[in-house]
Amino acid sequence: MPDTATVSRPTKMGAEVNRTNGIPKDGPTPPLASIDFSNYDITDPELWKRDAFWDRFTWMRKNDPVHYCPDSPFGPYWSVTRYQDIMTIDTTHGIFSSEGGITVVDQDEDFQLPMFIAMDPPKHDVQRKTVQSIVGPENLKGFESLIRERTTKIFDSLDVSKPFDWVDKVSIELTTMMLATLFDFPFEDRRKLTRWSDVATGRNNPEVVTSEEQWRAELLECLGYFTRLWNERVNAEPKGDLISMLAHGEHTRNMSPQEYLGNLILLIVGGNDTTRNSMTGGVYAMNKWPDQFEKLKANPELIPSAVSEIIRWQTPLAYMRRTALADFEIAGKTIRKGDKVLMWYVSGNRDEAQFTRPNELWIERPRVRGHISFGYGIHRCVGNRLAELQLKVLWEEILRRFERIEVLEEPSRVPSSFVKGYSRMLVRVTPKA
Ligand code: HEM
């Protein structure tokens, strides 16, 4: 029987919206057979919180790979679910624009946050160029020892006699420290970055903010803090941190405050949630496939390959949105000018036509860097090498000191179809004898 439940849930805080086919918070997840795909909205946060979307994507890849949702709280949208079709959209940036925004939610007319991930060439290209050297090979060399020192310090400070939350104690702490370094941000205030990252992506998550006013106020507080740092840096000699780069960059020094805030959010979220969730997802996956952890312990030279496989398996950003600038035919469907298109990386990374045993963590996977977790084309992740470096060091240090990391219960997941991640994961570690 088609599930036609209509659930009220807040989106733009304060305003309840009707979500057709939404899962009631206290109800069971409807089985696949009960779903009416002619009007199915896969962005339902409840599905993501429950990690219950996988069979929906398998169905779409097989039966309707470019799927149309005519009715969602954010308007109609297309879901592109197969690897090759995603590559086609991602590399056809002349037709598939990032300008309209990168998530299914449109920006508010009165609170625009321009950022270069949501721009098209030529503006995108010059702003990206302004900051990309921060994660260039020279800087990465210098970062490695710093990351190792911090990882060691965090592991040394753990009370290993008791279970603890890996998300808070390890993943958040490490990624936030890195972010503070990239911005040359006051270290003692670094948890503000974690908070602003959560707020930026948690607008519709009542566990993060409870009103639209609170959401805007916290982002403006972020802008206020960073404006003080901008003013310090703009009056000093150019340095290698992101704020100084933006304040002195030819194509960024005259940004409006909203555009500064937009780009800050991009860099905060880009550098934070994604790597954080890969740090947690990797430990979780190694628990699901303990033979892979044993193999890694016996063959530490597999760490770089394991890191890429973890990033594929986790896919920390489930999708990116584009907006069609012209009609386009794909997989027998016609996407119309103006339509929203969601490229579901999380589904492309599980595409049976592209990957052998796609649902498994397989650290020796052939062509392991061929995943699309970092996107593809002109917006491909700027920070991908830095993310890989952070994860490489993390796993090297894990192998050096822990015999075992045991996940004690199912982790809590973030109720978001965009940031695919974890809010808590209880673990117990066994140090090496
Ligand atoms: C595992 C970790 C990471 C994942 C999975 C990830 C994923 C992505 C994805 C999917 C995109 C968009 C691609 C597209 O639209 O086609 C992107 C863009 C971006 N990422 Fe990452 N990211 C990660 C880590 C980082 C880090 C550490 C940083 C910062 C240092 C960063 C900064 C950025 C920036 C600035 C962009 C915009 C690029 C552009 O528009 O040209 N990311 N990332």
Image (cartoon, rainbow, N blue to C red):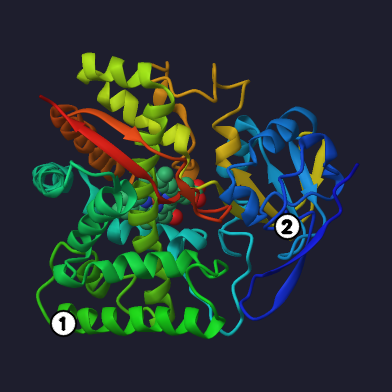
Outermost right residue: 1
At 13% across and 26% down in the image, what residue appears? 432
Frontmost of labels 2 and 1 is 2
Q: Do the residues labelled 2 and 1 touch (CB within 8 Å)?
A: no
Q: In this view, does 51 lie above or below 15?
A: above
* Residue 219 location, quadrant: bottom left
Question: On the image, which quarter does residue 9 sit in?
Answer: bottom right
Quarter occupied by residue 8: bottom right
Q: Which residue is drawn at 40% across and 63% down?
A: 266
Q: Which residue is drawn at 63% across and 36% down?
A: 54
Q: What residue type is labelled 2?
A: Pro
| First-in-chain label (2 vs 1) | 2
Mark 2 lies on residue: 24
Q: Position of residue 292 (x, y in %)?
A: 36, 19
Q: State the SS at label 1.
A: helix
Label 2, secondary structure: give it: loop
User: Mark 1 sits on what residue?
Assistant: 232
Q: Is residue 132 among the parts visible in the rendering? A: yes
Q: Which residue is drawn at 15% across and 62% down?
A: 240
Mark linked to residue 42: none
Residue 81 lies, with reference to residue 254, above or below; the image says above
Spatial CA distance of label 2 from label 1 is 50 Å
Residue 18 position within the rendered picture, expressed as x and y whole percent measured from the top left: 78, 67
Quarter that holds the C terminus: top left
| Position in image of residue 126 (x %, y %) | 37, 61
Q: Can residue 309 be seen in this view?
A: no
Considering every residue shown, the one lying at the far front of the view is 161
- Report whether the residue tagged 1 is closer than 8 Å to ligand 1: no
- Label 1 is placed on what type of residue? Glu
Q: In this view, does 431 lie to the left or right of 19?
A: left
Front position in the image: 164 or 387: 164
